[in-house]
Amino acid sequence: MNLFDLFINVVESFTICYFFGKYFELKNYKQYILNNIVIFLEITAGNLFINTSWLLIIIVGLTLLLLLKICHVRITIESAVVCICILFMDMICNNVALLIVTFFNMLISLENMSLTIAVIISKIFFIFVAVYISNKKIKFNTQLDESRWGSIVIVFSLLLISLYILANDYVTNNLNKVDVFICMILISINAIMVINVYLSILEENEEKMKIKIKNEEIKYKKENYIILARMSDELYRLQHNLRYVLLKIKYCLNDREYDKCKNLVDSYVDKLRKFKILINTDNPYFDYLINQELNDLNLRGIDINISVSISNSDYYLNKNYVNYVISLMEYLKDKVKKLTINIYEVNNNNVIEIILNELDDFFIQKNIQDLILLIDAEYKISKQNEMLIFKSIQQIHN
């Protein structure tokens, strides 16, 4: 063993311990240095006295688990798999580098430098893989359950065995049908495992989406409850003040102050107006966002008449649909002073009907056109008794 071999062992042990420390978030630098020394001595001794790479992987893997225990990290299936996998990664990098150098050696003669170049390329690959995976782990900071780790072990092992067989046959120039057939079976099993994991992930994501939707529903229900409670308090105060308003009107009438009477009535009607536009359809997401937009229109002084008769349905959780309704209101808020909106259901179709008497044309903007395509809606614009009617129909998909 020469200085170059010792240098490679240092790089290898440093990379393993770097990944080890980063992945398991070990903060004790004295322990980190000790880990480096232990792994370096073990790899060096293994290269001198152990001819089987598999045995060395097992020994170093068990040592890493022991070091985890010393660092007070709980030993789990994940930690065992990770400790073995990083060593397998080193072996894979060795095989890939050997394949690359063997390929180029056929093109240009590298003579005695081929093994040295292969080792350097292998360690560069290994460093890159270790840094990339450990940084990704820190970024996502998530945990897999034991069944997932079991699948990863099987998939990884089958890939490793296939790669080892093919690389060994390629390097020794002894590619035979039996080895190819074995690899085909292993890769087929691997494909089935990957599909199974993929379907399981889809199922889990579906469950997570349902939980997310439920949480959003609870959130918007709370928001709507707060709005309704506030409205109820304000309505109670208005009803309580009605007696005093009527008395004021009576005195004004006695004094023939008719303009003052009119102002008192208009003021009271304006205060009541916002209560007639509040909707509560038992679709929390839809109710909350539409009520917010209606409140904005009301603050702009637009006289709104809205009628909403819809079922409780997941369709009204569709953000594209809600954005569509809001975009229609946004388009009109600077163009009209009076607006009638009817939203209802007919034969499993949702209908949005907007009636205007102040516009000669209803121009569909690009952002509204895009939303119409997204929710697969059909619309028509017609005139009736000097009123402009916009009607949009879209099928309800739960």
Image: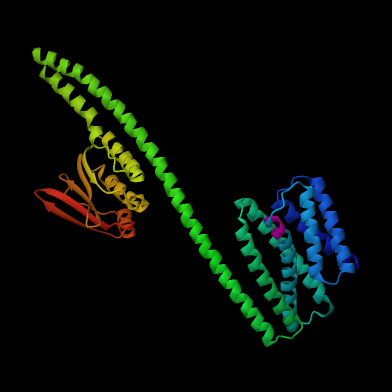
Where's residue 155, x and y in %? 63, 68
From this view, report whether residue 49 is shown above or below residue 76: below
Q: Which residues are magenta?
A: 78-82
Horizontal relation, residue 29 to residue 295: left or right: right
- Residue drawn at x 82%, y 50% is 33
Is residue 75 found inside the magenta-colored segment of the image? no
From this view, report whether residue 279 is shown above or below residue 112: above
Between 72 and 287, the residue placed more toward the observer is 72
- Residue drawn at x 13%, y 48% is 387
Is residue 81 found inside the magenta-colored segment of the image? yes
Horizontal relation, residue 398 to residue 4: left or right: left
Horizontal relation, residue 49 to residue 377: left or right: right
* Magenta stretch prevailing secondary structure: helix
| Quadrant (top left, top right, bottom left, bottom right) of the N terminus | bottom right
Where's residue 129, x and y in %? 69, 62
- Residue drawn at x 14%, y 20% is 261
Between 317 and 136, the residue placed more toward the observer is 317
Where's residue 119, x and y in %? 79, 70
Hey, which quadrant is residue 11 in on the image? bottom right
Where's residue 360, x and y in %? 16, 50
Q: How is the image coloured?
A: rainbow
Hey, which quadrant is residue 188 in on the image? bottom right
From this view, report whether residue 250 is shown above or below residue 76: above
Is any part of residue 157 visible from this angle?
Answer: yes
| Quadrant (top left, top right, bottom left, bottom right) of the C terminus | bottom left
Tally of numbered discs? 0
